[in-house]
Amino acid sequence: MNGRKQQLLKRHRRNKRIAMLVALLALLALGVLVAWWLPPLLLVLGWVAHEAWFADHLFYSPRDDYRYDFPDDCLSLPARIERGALQVEADLDDYDTLVLELRLTATWLGRWLDPYVLVGDDRQDFERGVAGRRYLNLSGVQANGLNIVSRFCRIEGELRLHAMHNPDYAAQRMLIIAPHADDAELAAFGQYSRSSDTAIVTLTQGEIEAENYQRLGLDKAAAARLKGRLRAWDSLAAPLWGGVPQQRCVQLGYYCLQLPAMAEQPQVPFGSRESGESDVRPVRRHNPLTLPADADGLPTWDNLIADLVAVIEHYRPEVLLTPHPQLDPHHDHVASTRAVLEACERSGWKPQTLLLYANHLHDNDRWPMGPAGNGIALPPAITPLPADRLWSPTLDAERQMDKAMALGLQHDLQGPLPLKRRLRRLIQWALAGRRWPATGEDEFFRKAVRRHELFWVRPL
């Protein structure tokens, strides 16, 4: 997490502690003044209510407007809904990415059940208690005459349709920058699985937080080394499920959560926080090309930049896919895009386009909200973002299933749910109507396997 998300989480936890203290004092007073058995009963009921309706990590008010600006080449025009169908006075055949701007206001049920909008045969969910400007993703459908029906919320105010035209970037030479082993699959499996010319470079081993492997009788360092080896293998092997051969996959072997420190001291090596290792070469043995850092194995920023320059010049991509530096708060994701931009400046080969993705958010851990298989509405943007064009290609049911199976190949997404989270899901299933897919227990099986993938487009 970057500094902003840490501040949001700190404020959330502080407010939660204050609320719990007030509730505890109230319960003690009830126990003294009314009956001894009332506080335990209310405590259990309060915990169930919290897990059902108040456990989401939502670090903004549902009443806040999303704030999006679109580029000058975006067609923006008024729209309306008549007898449940969208009406737009324009020919949209040349536009591949469509976004409907509208205002939503939750009904009283929409404070307890997730509000959503039915868009033809699609469904896009929003925050409980929503009351503000939101953006539906209509990409991949015929907008004019499209049935639009709200559930647990009302559509109010003026509507505007934003239409954007893009080339099919999957038909161009692509290089996907994955900070960790599963990031390429989460963000872009649908695109690389239909591309004939994609390469994937993974920057880190992903070795930290290896507690599950300590159950095998390993100490902390040995567990981290094993996890790093497994995730490095995942980064080379899993893309084959999507048609990308190992010869087009590169593992750089740097260490988790060390990229920002490396960037601040470019010549200083930063080894793993947990595995005890400080040589990136052991996980590079199956790389298809020799890289500059193979000479000394030092995990330095200078070596990382040199490696990326070599990869870019070797694969000569027209398009780079990399994390969105303003939307995705993960430290390694922000540093990865910083490294890519620096490498592009030094490289003799100049890609033409950046496609930016967000696998994490600052202020909403559930986005994309709602069940798997549905569309991806635009994420919260409470502070203004750059006015980027959007590209949101669609995935049919077969490709969505292949994407889910690709995620299932990732060791980091295979672990069992902790008991607390399993109980929370059971309570939310029973009381709040939430559902999770059968393809996997990790939250990313719900969030990432959708009928859309979503990218922000920036020229280089």
Image (cartoon, rainbow, N blue to C red):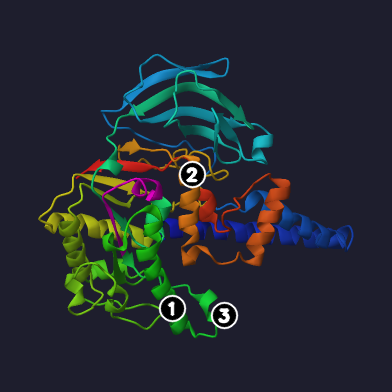
Q: Secondary structure at mark 2?
A: helix
Q: Secondary structure at mark 3?
A: loop
Q: Position of residue 208 (x, y in %)?
A: 43, 73
Quarter of the rendering containing residue 221:
bottom left
Q: Amino acid at mark 3?
A: Arg
- Observer-side mark, 2 or 3, equals 2
Q: Which numbered circle lies on residue 226?
A: 1
Structural distance between the alpha carbons of marks 1 and 2: 33 Å
For the question of whether residue 267 can be seen, the reply is no
- Observer-side mark, 1 or 2, equals 2
Structural distance between the alpha carbons of marks 2 and 3: 36 Å
Around disc 3, counting alpha carbons within 10 Å, would you say few (fewer than 14), some (14 to 19), or many (20 or more)?
A: few
Quarter of the rendering containing residue 71:
top left
Mark 2 lies on residue: 398
Q: Is residue 331 above or below residue 172?
A: below
Q: Could you tell me if the residues under marks 2 and 3 are in contact, i.e. CB atoms within 8 Å?
A: no
Structural distance between the alpha carbons of marks 1 and 3: 12 Å
Quarter of the rendering containing residue 163:
top left
In this picture, residue 23 sits left or right of residue 73: right
Mark 3 lies on residue: 215
Q: Amino acid at mark 1?
A: Leu
- In the rendered image, residue 189 lying in the magenta stretch gets the answer yes
In this picture, residue 376 sits left or right of residue 95: right
Give the magenta range: 188-202
Which one is earlier in the sequence, the residue at label 2 or at label 3? 3
